[in-house]
Image (cartoon, rainbow, N blue to C red):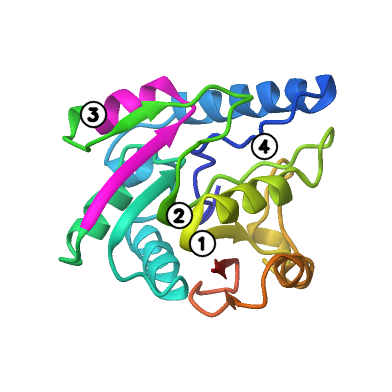
């Protein structure tokens, strides 16, 4: 699928309702099946359209969040490419990665990514981190829980000390670059949601070649 980020993170909000739990399990199965069909370089295994687009999204995450080093949670770490991107910035880094796909966790560990662990569907990460990043965990739509991404974004903000930043496929993505099962979020909806959580937030809809993605950061 063109330029689509991997849905490589534990997309769940920790709720204990039967319906959302089943939805989370379904999303986890969809993600694992998606990854199972991918091989090659790490950016392709993670599900990105190219190394350049992966790098553009990582740059947007750090830039939008005013990243300055510190403790980081990579929610949906995949094979750990964000760790190497952050390390190359030569800022203080205490990294933790979580993913719901055992294959991705094993691959990240084999590449020397530190502090990577499996986070089963139905659980949300605990602890507190200076920065919480989630790149590509909202690729797939969920008809049973269409706004599932809002509770995940709120939890990411709740466990951040300085900022949480996540990427979305944009509702302004051209029709020919869309897939039927993907989630295309409305930046205006996310702006209203962000404003309800904090007075300090930022959206970047400028970095993707055809306006197909955006990044939102929520600040403490």
99 part of magenta stretch: yes
Q: In the rendered structure, are the residues bearing label 1 and label 4 in contact, judged by CB atoms less than 8 Å apart?
A: no
Disc 2 from disc 3: Cα separation: 19 Å
127 part of magenta stretch: no
> Which quadrant of the view contains residue 200?
bottom right
Residue picked out by circle 1: 165
Judge by depth and name the residue closer to the eye, 67 or 205: 67
Disc 1 from disc 4: Cα separation: 16 Å
The numbered disc on residue 13 is 4
Disc 2 from disc 1: Cα separation: 5 Å
Relative to 193, 44 lies left or right:
left
Q: Counting residues from the N terminus, which is met first, the one under dot 1 or under dot 4?
A: 4
> Which quadrant of the view contains residue 24?
top right
Q: Which residues are magenta?
A: 93-108
Q: Counting residues from the N terminus, which is met first, the one under dot 4 or under dot 2?
A: 4
> Which quadrant of the view contains residue 143?
top right
Q: Is residue 142 visible?
A: yes
The numbered disc on residue 133 is 2
Relative to 6, 109 lies left or right:
left
Residue 26 against residue 90 in the figure, above or below: above
The numbered disc on residue 109 is 3
Q: In the rendered structure, are the residues bearing label 2 and label 3 in contact, judged by CB atoms less than 8 Å apart?
A: no
Residue 116 against residue 133 in the figure, above or below: above
Residue at 41% across, 51% down: 129
Q: Counting residues from the N terminus, which is met first, the one under dot 3 or under dot 4?
A: 4
Q: Is residue 104 visible?
A: no
Q: Secondary structure at mark 2?
A: strand
């Amino acid at each position: 699928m063109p330029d689509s980020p991997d849905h490589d993170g534990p997309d769940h909000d920790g709720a204990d309702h039967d319906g959302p739990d089943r939805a989370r399990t379904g999303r986890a199965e969809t993600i694992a099946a998606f990854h199972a069909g991918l091989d090659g370089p790490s950016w392709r295994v993670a599900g990105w359209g190219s190394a350049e687009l992966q790098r553009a999204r990582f740059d947007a995450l750090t830039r939008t969040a005013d990243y300055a080093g510190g403790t980081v949670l990579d929610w949906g770490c995949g094979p750990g490419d964000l760790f190497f991107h952050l390390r190359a910035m030569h800022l203080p880094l205490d990294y933790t990665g979580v993913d719901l796909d055992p294959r991705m966790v094993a691959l990240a560990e084999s590449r020397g990514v530190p502090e990577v662990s499996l986070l089963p569907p139905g659980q949300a990460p605990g602890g507190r981190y200076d920065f919480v990043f989630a790149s590509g965990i909202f690729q797939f739509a969920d008809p049973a829980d269409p706004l599932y991404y809002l509770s995940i974004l709120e939890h990411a903000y709740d466990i951040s000390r300085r900022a949480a930043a996540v990427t979305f496929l944009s509702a302004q993505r051209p029709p020919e670059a869309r897939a039927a099962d993907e989630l295309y979020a409305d930046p205006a909806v996310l702006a209203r949601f962000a404003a309800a959580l904090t007075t300090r937030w930022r959206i970047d809809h400028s970095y993707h070649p055809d306006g197909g993605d955006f990044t939102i950061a929520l600040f403490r």
